[in-house]
Structure formats: structure tokens, C-alpha cells
Amino acid sequence: MPSIGINVETGRSYQVWIGRDLLKGIGESVSALHGPCSLALVSDGTVDPLYGGMTAKSFTRAGFRVVRHVVPPGERSKNMAQLSLLLESLAEEKFTRTDLIVALGGGVVGDLAGFAAAVYERGIPYIQVPTTLLAAVDSSVGGKTAVNLAAGKNLVGAFWQPRMVLCDCGTFSSLPREELASGGAECLKYGMLGDEALFQRLGEGLYTPWEDIVTHCVRRKAEIVERDETDKGMRQLLNFGHTAGHAAEMLSGYTLRHGEAVGLGMLIITRAAEVMGICVPGVAEKIESALRAMDLPTRCPYSSRQLALAALGDKKRRGDEFTLVMPRRVGECFLYPVEAGRLPEILSLGMEEPPCA
């Protein structure tokens, strides 16, 4: 059995299991929650060759009828075309609301499969099985599902909580260092949101084994999601670094990894907060040092105006207002509403360029 279980008490509660070698017995674990049925195992072209066969065999041994659906790897697969292909596949295989979707992979697979589960026959159960550090601490927990549009990231989606999250940290061993570092940036975010000790540990570089780090991050996210499941208030704190980060991702054509972009976003907004007198001095320097320790970028290739223009299509905008997440110090951030017209000026304060007029 998994070594660590964390309850997430949302409208429909579920557990996050964290450990190693969990994929070998995933069929037994899931059958205890949901009886044998038709099961869509959704993965991508990178993860499926590594773990798809083993996972499918475990489900088959437990009595499930397994249908494997593989999408191309990368953020470009998180779109309406791939969603449509997945939904058509479910319909062709005669899936119903008594059946199950399992998302085996990183954040792209989890968001795509989760959104398909939310809308197919008005909602069928699904399980998140993250195989990346980033997905384990971020997208697999909390029930946010979405795909991207040309105008912006995650603009079409739904809140649909999984029935279970099973995180086998052993899968992280197959990740390239750059992908681990991308997840490390999201872990650093949780340190900024309320765990100074976690921040200090990550400031020393990538940390293994990962079970303890993942547990810290998931517990913090669960606490926030339980108090604001549908992102109306404090859950927006989880967007620290994401306004500029999502904009940089989109401008790069998604060649910039999500964690790399979020790391830049955290650094930019913290520098701006220090200039504005909102944040105590020295925090941006600590973030930059931590990013460097994980070999993450610290220079943004885009201007503040480019970032602000790209951010206008972000779902965090409410009419003519953005809600930025600003830091006060390591371990404390708060929500800071601003008019959209001020965004270029604020971002320029955190970048190595002349301030906007």
C-alpha cells in the first residue's frame, strides 16, 4: 500500500497517495475504490512506453477492460483538437458514467483527461496518476481541468475533482534534470506561500528523495483548496508568479517549461513588490539564488509590455482588473488587485529594463 495518504476535503473528498512502486499494484488500489469496469488509460508518447504497459497489466489483472489512448507529448497537445479525439474515442468504446478515466502522465495529460472526464456524459469519474514532480505538486490536486486556446492558457476548462490521486515518486527517476527543475519551481512557490523551511531546503538545489517535498506541497495545496474550491478567493494565492509566467509560456510557443516560466514570474513580481515597498528587501535575491541552484532561468526574454499584452487574455483578469499575488516576505503572500492598465508599469519594475512611463 502507498506510504502516505492525504485527505482532500472538497465537495467530493478524495485521497492523495504518495510513495514508491505504486504503479505495480495500481489495479488493486483502484478496484478497492471503483469496481472493475471499462477504463481509459490516457497517456502521452513519452510516458506510455515507460509505464503504460505495466500500468495496463495491473488494471487488467484486477478485472478492468483497458483502452489505451496516447497523445503526442508536450503542451501543444492540450487543445480542443486532442480533446475532441479523446471524447470520440470514449464514445466509440461505449464508455458510460459507470466507467473510469485514468490520467497517467504530466500536467498536460492530467488537464486534458480531467477535462474530458468533466464533460463526457456530463461527468464521469477519473483518477490522476502524475509521473512528473510538477504534476504531483500542482495540477493533479485540486480539480482544475482545462485546455488551451490560441488566445491563452487554460481558457476552456471545468472544476472536476478526481476520485483519487496516486503519486509514484519512483517515476521521477526517468525525468530529465530540466523537467525536475521545472517542478522544483512550483515547490519553491509553496515555500513562498507559507513554508519558509521548505523554501530554505529548495534554496540548496534539487532535493531527493522527493516523497517528503511532495507531501509538504500537497498538504499546503489541500489546505488552500479545501477553503476555496472554485478559486473565488484565497485559492488565487496559488497563482503566485503565474500572471507573467503564463504570458511568457505563451510568447515562447510553449517551448519554455511551465516551471521555468513560473520561476521567472515569481522573480519579476517579487522584484516589483520590493521596489513598490510591499515586500521586505532581499526576498527577490533569495528567489533568484534558489532558481540558479536548480539551474532555472533568471532572465526573461520578453519585455514588460509583451508580457502585459499576452496576459490580457489570461483567465485571472476580471474585466479591467487583475488580481496579482504579491509577496510580503518568504512564507507570506497576499492578493493585490490592480487595474489592467497598470500591469506593464508594475512588471517593468521587476525587470531589467527602463520603467514604463
Image (cartoon, rainbow, N blue to C red):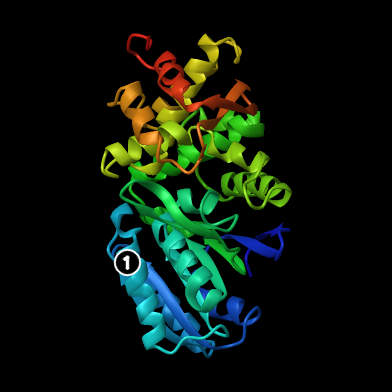
Q: Quadrant of residue 291?
A: top left
Eyeballing the image, is 247 above or below 174? above
Q: Quadrant of residue 45?
A: bottom left
Percent of width and height locating residue 221: 63, 46
Number of numbered discs overlaid on the protein picture = 1
Percent of width and height locating residue 76: 29, 55
Foreground: 253 or 336?
Answer: 336
Residue 200: tell me if it is visible.
no
Eyeballing the image, is 104 above or below 293? below
Q: Is residue 147 left or right of residue 282?
A: left
Which image quarter holds the N terminus?
A: bottom right
- Residue appearing at x 43%, y 82% in the figure: 57
Q: Quadrant of residue 156?
A: bottom left
Residue 125: tell me if it is visible.
yes
Within 10 Å of disc 1 (Cα), the crowding (few <14, some 14-19, many 20+) is some
Which image quarter holds the C terminus?
A: top left
- Residue appearing at x 30%, y 55% in the figure: 74
Foreground: 299 or 213?
Answer: 299
- Residue appearing at x 54%, y 69% in the figure: 127
- Residue appearing at x 63%, y 52% in the figure: 230
Q: Amino acid at mark 1?
A: Gln
Give the SS element for disc 1.
Answer: helix
Eyeballing the image, is 264 above or below 186? above
Q: Is residue 237 left or right of residue 320?
A: right
Percent of width and height locating residue 317: 50, 37
Disc 1 designates what residue? 82
